[in-house]
């Protein structure tokens, strides 16, 4: 039970870190730029929200299979298969939780008062400088929400990780899958315990999200 | 040094049609709400997409005929909005030095003393009064030693006594920095005390440009009249209205 929980937490942490880096430029262009194909990009980002996890898992498997481009490259670089591995699950999780990272950030960026962005320009700050000094500090709350939701959502994955990871004990068997197997094998007390831990973790994460949304962390105050 | 602005552009329901010249001097713009005063300031700054020409400090900032726009970041502006626009997570001190790479302590000290905000430096914007916040915004715009100072009602929240002192400060700073200062104001006193040029705007046009210098505003096609030599501003305004 412990090993599956540790794998879940590891997967959620790695996924969240990668997602913050991936989601930042995506949220930035979606919030501030208008370009051809913008709606298309927004739809692609939101797709994992409605797609059956097995469908996503299926395509990720095709993407990372040893005879695919990515899978083949991985195989030659690290001499191991990307499918049915922890790294493969990370790839799948990043795609699966993408909207949970992008959307809060995009909303936070959009909520920044227009004047603050103008101020950056008027004070001679270039884009990178404005991003570090104004946009990111002003969006602290949204970024925290993005991290909490990505973590919680990755912890709660089932279908995708089952298809891509294959439930190998000690390697790719995460807590949600372990719980399923416990119930199947009628290990009542262990199932009860694991379910409670997962419930508590999700509860705490959402508590963080809602507290942030309520508090002034996104700082709409303007003088 | 003469600077020239020639703008000809539709902004929403407003048609901005301005052609004027000014030196390194104090220009006061007045006019009714919606006359385009703030829009004109924003156009000069580059915060609005406009067509026309802006020639500042012997350099093109805007030349639509050549498709050229100098990015705002390179214009070295000092801009003050009608709100203070302070960043709430930074102290007053950090707000003032925002965007400035090389700090100048002597200059900083001079500014915060003259603008009477020295006692506020360690505080956060949320505890400031509107008037104090406005003076901080003024300090931030001036600290970077701008090439032009564009002020949208910068004294609106100040009490009368400090307002008078601030006018003197602004005059001193203008002489010290040798830059043009364009100030939008509804306060007649600002125009009377400060203006070396006084532009009155109506429906996007400069209706009257009163020039306190001996020369009339050259090339100002839209001016209804120019003040004659050494004209007294107050008297002229009475005559006009």
Image: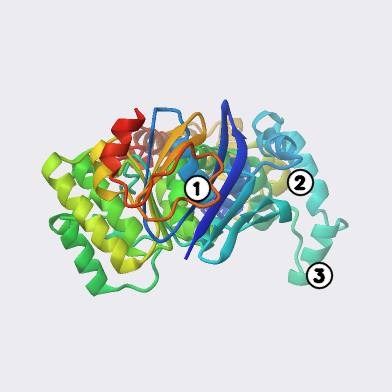
Q: In which quadrant is the C terminus of chain A drawn?
A: top left
Q: Do the dots labelled 1 and 2 sit on one chain?
A: yes
Q: Residue sitting at 80 percent across and 59 percent down?
A: A71
Determine whether A139 is above or below B114 in the image: above
| Mark 1 Cα-neighbour bin, 10 Å: few <14, some 14–19, many ≥20 | many
For marks 3 and 1, the one nearer the N-term is: 1
Q: How is the image coloured?
A: rainbow
Residue B96 quadrant? bottom left
Q: Which residue is mark 2?
A: A60
Question: From the viewer's perspective, is A169 left or right of B220?
Answer: right
How much space separates mark 1 and mark 2, taking CA atoms?
A: 23 Å
Q: Which label lies toward us, 3 or 1?
A: 3
Q: Do the dots labelled 3 and 2 sit on one chain?
A: yes
For marks 1 and 2, the one nearer the N-term is: 1
Callout 1 secondary element: helix
Residue A5, disc: 1
Q: Residue furthest right?
A: A67
Q: Which residue is mark 3?
A: A76
Callout 3 secondary element: helix
| Mark 2 Cα-neighbour bin, 10 Å: few <14, some 14–19, many ≥20 | many
Judging from the image, mark 2 belongs to the subunit labelled A
Judging from the image, mark 1 belongs to the subunit labelled A
Residue B147, disc: none
Q: Is residue B90 visible?
A: no
Q: Are marks 1 and 2 in contact (CB under 8 Å)?
A: no
Judging from the image, mark 3 belongs to the subunit labelled A
In percent of width and height, residue B155 lies at 25, 43
How much space separates mark 3 and mark 2, taking CA atoms?
A: 19 Å
| Mark 3 Cα-neighbour bin, 10 Å: few <14, some 14–19, many ≥20 | few
How much space separates mark 3 and mark 1, taking CA atoms?
A: 31 Å
């Amino acid at each position: 039970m412990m090993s599956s929980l540790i794998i879940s937490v590891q997967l959620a942490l790695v996924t969240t870190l990668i997602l913050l880096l991936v989601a930042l430029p995506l949220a930035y262009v979606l919030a501030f730029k208008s370009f051809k194909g913008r709606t298309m990009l927004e739809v692609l980002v939101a797709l994992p929200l409605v797609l059956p996890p097995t469908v996503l898992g299926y395509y990720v498997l095709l993407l990372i299979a040893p005879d695919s481009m990515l899978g083949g490259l991985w195989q030659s670089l690290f001499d191991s298969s990307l499918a049915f591995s922890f790294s493969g699950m990370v790839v799948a999780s990043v795609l699966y939780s993408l909207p949970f990272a992008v959307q809060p950030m995009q909303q936070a960026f959009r909520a920044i008062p227009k004047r603050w962005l103008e101020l950056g320009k008027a004070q001679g700050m270039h884009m990178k400088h404005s991003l570090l000094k104004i946009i990111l500090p002003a969006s602290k709350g949204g970024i925290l929400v993005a991290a909490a939701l990505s973590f919680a959502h990755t912890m709660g994955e089932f279908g995708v990780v089952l298809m891509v990871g294959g439930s190998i004990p000690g390697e790719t068997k995460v807590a949600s899958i372990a719980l399923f197997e416990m119930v199947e094998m009628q290990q009542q007390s262990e199932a009860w315990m694991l379910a409670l831990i997962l419930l508590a973790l999700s509860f705490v994460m959402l508590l963080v999200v809602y507290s942030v949304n309520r508090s002034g962390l996104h700082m709409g105050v303007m003088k | 040094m003469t600077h020239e602005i020639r703008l000809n552009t539709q902004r929403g329901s407003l048609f901005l049609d301005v052609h004027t010249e000014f030196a390194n001097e104090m220009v006061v713009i007045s006019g009714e709400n919606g006359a385009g005063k703030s829009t004109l300031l924003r156009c000069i700054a580059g915060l609005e997409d406009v067509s026309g020409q802006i020639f500042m400090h012997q350099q093109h900032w805007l030349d639509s005929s050549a498709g050229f726009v100098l990015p705002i970041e390179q214009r070295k502006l000092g801009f003050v909005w009608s709100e203070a626009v302070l960043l709430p997570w930074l102290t007053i001190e950090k707000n003032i030095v925002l965007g400035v790479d090389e700090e100048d302590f002597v200059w900083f000290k001079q500014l915060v003393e003259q603008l009477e905000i020295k006692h506020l430096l360690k505080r956060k914007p949320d505890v400031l009064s509107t008037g104090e916040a406005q003076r901080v915004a003024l300090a931030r715009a001036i600290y970077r030693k701008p090439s032009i100072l564009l002020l949208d009602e910068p004294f609106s929240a100040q009490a009368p006594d400090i307002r008078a002192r601030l006018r003197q400060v602004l005059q001193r700073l203008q002489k010290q920095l040798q830059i043009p200062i364009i100030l939008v104001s509804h306060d007649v006193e600002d125009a009377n005390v400060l203006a070396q040029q006084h532009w009155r705007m109506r429906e996007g046009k400069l209706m009257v440009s009163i020039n306190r210098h001996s020369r009339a505003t050259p090339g100002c096609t839209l001016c209804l009249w120019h003040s004659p030599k050494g004209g007294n501003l107050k008297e002229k305004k009475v005559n006009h209205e």
